[in-house]
Structure formats: C-alpha cells, structure tokens
Image (cartoon, rainbow, N blue to C red):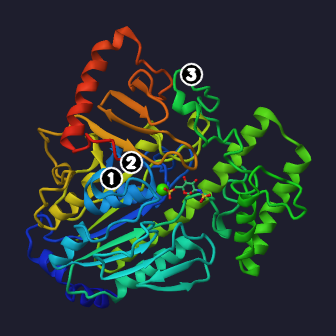
Amino acid sequence: MKSINLLTAIGMGALALTGCAKKSEPVKQPNIIFIMSDDHSYQTISAYSDKLIKTPNIDRIASGGVIFQNSFVGNSICGPSRATLLTGKHTHINGQINNRVTFDGSQETFPKLLQQAGYQTALVGKWHLRSNPTGFDYWNILPGQGEYYNPHFIEMGQKKRFEGYVTNLTTDFALDWLNGRDKTKPFCLLLHNKAPHRTWMPDTADLKLFADRQFELPDNFFDEYEGRQAAKEQKLSIRESDMDLVYDLKMADKEKEIVTPRPGLANGQRNRLKAMNPAQRKAWDAHYDPIIKDFKDRKLKGKELDEWKYQRYMHDYLGCIKSVDDNVGRVLDYLKANGLDENTIVVYTSDQGFYMGEHGWFDKRFMYEESFRTPLVMKLPKGYNKRGAVKQLVQNIDYAPTFLDLAGVKIPESVQGVSLKPLLKEGKVEKWRDALYYHYYEFPNEHMVKKHYGVRTDRYKLIHFYHDIDTWELFDLEKDPQEMHNLINDKAYAEVKTNLMKKLKELQVQYNDTDRSKY
Ligand code: SGN
Ligand code: CA
C-alpha cells in the first residue's frame, strides 16, 4: 500500500512543489476543498458547542487549523450567499440580492481566476443560482433546491436521476472527480451539500439517532417580540403553522386525517415519499408510522404542541447533520489516504446560520445573531500554523480574496472582502475591520422577513427595517446576546446610537450601497 501512495504522491505537481519547500514554508498553490452545507447552524457543530450534537469529523477540520468565532454573512439566504462566495462582493454589487434573480455568470469570480492561475476547478451539489455554473472545469449540480432521496443531478448540462441519499451521492461525485482529475495541477473543489435544508429528511440509517433525546427549549422560545415589529410580523415560527405538521414534521398519515392550512405543502411531502424506493419507504414508514399514531392519539394543543413540534424538528434536522458529518469524514480520509493532507486547505461552512428554536423560529434571513452568523472552520495546509479560535470579524465576502491570496493570485480591486490569510498564521494581526455590513432584500416573500440593513461591531448591532415599515433596532450584545431588548429609544445608549449611525453611513459609502431606490 505504502508504495502505491508514494507513487500517487510523486505524480502530483502541487505536492512535488511542497516536497522542495522548507518545513515551515507555506505550500505554493495549495489545493482547496470548500465544503458548504445549506442552512447548517453553528449551534449544531460540536467544535462550537456540543450541547445538541457531536460532529467529530467537522471538528477534525477545526482541530487541524482554526475556528472562526465571529464569522458572518452579508445577506442571510442561499443564492445571495453563494454569489458573494464566488465574487467576494456584497449582493447589491454582484446582483444576486435574493433567490429570485438569475446569477450573472459572466462576472469575474474566484474559480475563473484560479483556473487562469493553473488550477482545476470543480463544483458538486447545491448551486441554486439559476444560470449554469461558469469557471468550473467540472460541475455536477442539483436542480434548484434538490431532493434528499433519489435526486436528479445536472452533470455538465445533462440531467439524470440517481438512486441513493443526496449527501452520500454528493460526496461520491466529489471523490470520483478527485480520483479522475489531472494530478499534475492544483485543484479547487466546491462541495455543496443540500442538507440540512428544509424539509430535513435524514438518511434512513440515521432516522432513529435522536429519537430518545428530549431537547431543552431555548430560553427565548416563547419570545413575544416586544419592541421588535419586524420580528413580530415574520412567518418562520415553529409555534405557528409556518412550520407545517405534514410537510415539515412528516405527519403524512395514510388516512389523511391530519389536515394543515396549506394542502399544497402536504402534497409536496407526500410526493417526496412516493419517490422513495421500496426499501427506503419501508425504513421510513417503520420509523414515522408509530410517531404519527402517537401524535394522533395525544391530540396535543397549545404549548405542549409547540414543544412537541420543536422536538420533532430537532430530531430530523440533527439526523441530517449526522450524514453531513460522516461524509466530511470520508473527504478527510480520502485526503489522508492519497497524500493530500498537507497541501490542502479544507474549509467547512454554511451558506448562512439557522434558528434552532431561538425566538421560536426556524429558517434564517434576519440580521439577528443565529442567522447572521455562520460556522467557519479551516484545516490548514503546511506553513499556516495558527491553531484554535480566531476572534476577528470575518464575512463571506472574504472567502474569494482568501483563496486567491493563498494561490498567489492578485486580488482584483473591485473585490469588497479582504484576505483572511494574515489570520491563518501565528502572530499578532495589527489592523482589522471593526464593523460588518448587512443587507437583506427578499420581501414580501415566504417567511415575510422585512427588508433590512444594519451594522454590527464587536459589541453592538443597529438594524433598520424598511419598505412597508420604518423601524430601527439597537442591541447591546454583551448584555443581551439573545437580542430581546431593543435599546433604540434608551437615552443611556444615545451616544452608542449616534456612533453606530455614523458607522453605518460610512459602510454604505465604502461598499457602495447608498442608492436604495432600486430595491
Ligand atoms: C425554500 C424553503 C424556505 C426557505 C427558502 C430559502 N421552503 O423556499 O423555507 O427559506 O427555500 O432557502 S421549501 O418549502 O421549499 O422548503 S435557501 O437556503 O435556499 O435560501
Ligand atoms: Ca441556505
């Protein structure tokens, strides 16, 4: 075995380069594996907190490098986040302000620049940008949101259905590409999971994993949104029919006695079950049928029903994470077995954060912490010796310039993010940004989160909700990390407010977001 590994290693240009490098020197043109899941909250990664689940493989990435404690997105929703990843620009600049518009694939992106610098580039899994991917030597994407069971993939324009579970299949395709790639060139692989996106359908192997766990409700699960009008008027509540019993929580009883307000949704979930093969369906029903029966017998109401919904949600969401983590393990094992361990940076992140019942919610979109933040861990290649927590404020506009910088490619002037490279080496970083900018646009639409923009510093956050309302919110994150007390009219915070207003204006000028007439 050893000699085969050695032969493979010798065949690899990038590794050959490192072979000549001195011990502590960074690898020239490291390989890049960027794993991004869809809607994976930092609350459900044990490198951040093991209160809800253990994710040993994602944690392996963190322990081989760094864990960003203050990592954020610029617009907490899928398409916008992905366009920002590719361009290093906020969404009002790259045009992808919401999920409804089509990404302009003719613009400059980091995969295109890496290709020009000699990298092979590939994209596998969720894409959700409507136009065909550009800048990739190979792509194999899910159409739209993709399906969990027996999904279609579109491989370089050819649509085909595959039998199996989406997270396993996505990783299979990624590893197949790695195996077949031109081993004389460095590579950049984007592996984008569908999971754990709604409707949170775990693999049959993982259905029962959390069945016996009773999760504690978040302290602010029964939030009444005092002083926060936009929070009151959203439609992403677990406690309301926004979280549908049949669609989201799988109570698709055969008798069709459980009727929910949006029959279209229920039908959607029933159709998903019909698309399963007999073995998948058998395992599925063996798990859910007794839960459905018990649910019908108990006739829950009020807070008991709310709490039951929360438990069901957690069980299914966390079941999806288990498969994501297992598949991250497969990628790490592959790198190790193929001698790619030392010259590859492995990044794990999500397209945004997600609510695990905080404020009573699921979904994302708001600039409140749970969805504004996103997990970010990196296993670092040789020569990047920083380990443990990174505290600086970082944002998804920074990914593209970071990868370009690591590859030794000049970062275009028009890129709005900054390279994180200085944070990946030991030693003090003297100057760093002191505030982040955020802007969300998808209103009115599903979940009814109002348009808003805002600024966050280490300690404070200021948000302006606009369009059909005009409200401001100010939070002291040190005293009120759950963002329950809007201090906008609190005299004691008058000076803080003035400074934040000023900072917000500066950021809008810096990022060229002063003209809101077009939104
Ligand atoms: C779908 C979901 C929403 C979700 C959006 C955006 N509904 O519309 O709950 O907010 O995607 O998610 S579903 O009925 O289709 O599941 S995103 O991550 O793709 O931006
Ligand atoms: Ca998402």
Label 1 neighbourhood size at 10 Å, few (<14), some (14-19), many (20+)? many
Viewer can see residue 64: no
- Is 77 situated above or below 473? below
Q: Looking at the picture, how far across and down is residue 122, in whole percent? A: 33, 77
Tell me the crowding category of disc 2: few under 14, some 14 to 19, or many 20 or more residues within 10 angstroms, Cα based: many
In the rendered image, which residue does mark 2 sit on? Answer: 75
Toward the viewer: 107 or 208? 107
Instruction: Please tell me which residue lies in front, 485 or 406.
Output: 485
User: The N terminus is located in which quarter?
Assistant: bottom left
Q: Earlier in the sequence, mark 3 or mark 1?
A: 1
Which element carries disc 2, helix, strand or loop? loop
Mark 2 beta carbon near ligand 1 (under 8 Å): no
Q: Earlier in the sequence, mark 2 or mark 1?
A: 2
How many numbered badges does the structure rendering display?
A: 3
The image shows residue 458 at horizontal and vertical percentages of 30, 31
Q: Does residue 418 lie above or below 478 as drawn?
A: below
Mark 3, residue position: 226
- The quarter of the image that holds ligand 1 is bottom right
Q: Is residue 274 left or right of residue 103?
A: right
Q: Label 1's element?
A: helix
Asked which quadrant contains residue 14, the reply is bottom left
Per the model, the C-alpha gap separating discs 2 and 3 is 24 Å
Tag 2: amino acid:
Asn
On the question of residue 195 being in view, the answer is: yes
**Which residue in the protein does label 1 denote?**
91
Residue 196 in the figure: left or right of residue 81: right
